Image (tube, helix red, strand yellow):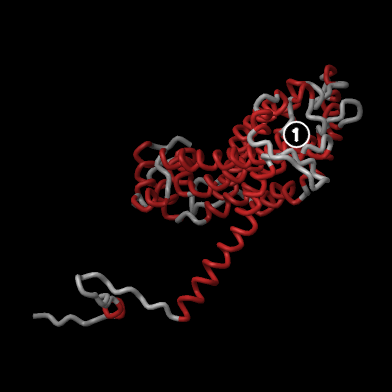
Amino acid sequence: MKDTIPTAGTASRRPEPAARGGRPRRRKLTFDRVTFFLAFLGVPLAIFVIFVLIPFGQAIFWAMTDWRGFSPDYNFVGFDNFTKMFQDDIFLKALRNVALLAVFVPLVTLTLALGVAVAITLGGPGKGPVRGIRGASFYRIVSFFPYVVPAIIVGLIWAQMYDPNAGLLNGVLTGLGLDRFDTFAWLGEKATAMPAVMFVIIWGLVGFYAVLFVAAIKGVPAELYEAARIDGAGRLRTTISITLPAIRDSVQTAYIYLGIAALDAFVYVQAMVPNGGPDNSTLTISQRLFNVAFAKQQFGYATAMGVVLAVVTLVFAALVFLVNRLTGGGEGESKRKAPGSAARRAAAKGGAG
């Protein structure tokens, strides 16, 4: 009969003392436990209640009044502001505009950012250790630079570049022989105003998310890429079968942040087209809210718009989480997959690079 030598792991796994009836006893509330919960749970919860829940509750209250912002007098009007809002054609146009921004801006930005990140980290030679392209640090700095510039400055710079008479964009296109762009108003045409605004937002944000994805990809075990390369998987198949599943949580978080930024987009749009663009084609909810509050002094009505924008943002985040869960995402799913399964799948499907 062999003797069992207790180790540090087995010695530490002592059975919990049980009370009568087989139930584990409750741990006593010691001073250390109480102070721990107060410091790491009570304080953050109090901050969240004071600075998030209470202001949001106040916003809901003011949204049901006709408060004009600069007077203590107001009347309670119930849901009249919300009813008026969804009968307001301008607000509905702004709602459609932010829906377009929330769909296209995150999708295009994250696609470009992921392509840049994969090229920087995995786009090196096809033989030898997996590594990025030469001069990867330089490309990271160049791609990140637009994010360092404040959004208002980016908007003002591009407004000058889009200028129909002295803008750099029309000058370059005219110099290439495209005379029809001599005095073309990119922000003054309904067909091009929103795409032009989207381009600026994407240009300003893609570098930050490229750097974020670079950090996430560097956390993927190099053995997976080396096994896939040995088995013949190309760069495209490796990206789809290994990189994307491994950084799925980072992509989800980035999509939510980008969607929230696109739903607002106040700074970029206000800098380039403060009047809402031709036929309100670039008007956002935050712009409409700002104009109603400070130009018309209808703060109750403007607050109702803010409440709707907050609800739309929460619904957007919930949809992203739901889609991620329905498509097989989540922490539990990633834990159930064996580390080498992605490499085996990539090898089975063959090199598609």
245 sits left or right of 297 in the view: left
- x then y, percent, for residue 270: 79, 37
Image: 17 above or below 165: below
Mark 1 residue type: Arg
Front residue (pair 172, 261): 261
**How many numbered markers are drawn?**
1
Quadrant of the rendered structure where residue 165 is?
top right
Image coordinates for residue 187, horizontal then vertical, percent: 80, 27
Q: Which residue is more in the foreground, 89 or 203?
A: 89
Categorize mark 1 by other alpha carbons within 10 Å: few (<14), some (14-19), many (20+): many
The residue positioned farthest toward the left in the image shown = 1
Residue drawn where x is 69% and y is 47% of the image = 143
What residue is rendered at 14% in x and 82% in y? 3
Looking at the image, can residue 226 be seen?
Answer: yes
Residue at 40%, 42% (x, y): give it. 328
Q: Which residue is drawn at 54% across and 67% down?
A: 42
221 to 81, vertically: above or below: below
- Foreground pick, 10 / 299: 299
Residue 202 visible in the snapshot: no
Q: Quadrant of the N terminus?
A: bottom left
At numbered mark 1, what does the secondary structure look like: helix, strand or loop? helix
How far across and down, in percent of the image, does residue 7 sit? 27, 80
Q: Mark 1 points at which residue?
A: 288
Left or right of 257 in this view: 26: left
Nearer to me, 172 or 206: 206
Pinpoint residue 91: horizontal percent, then vertical percent.
70, 29
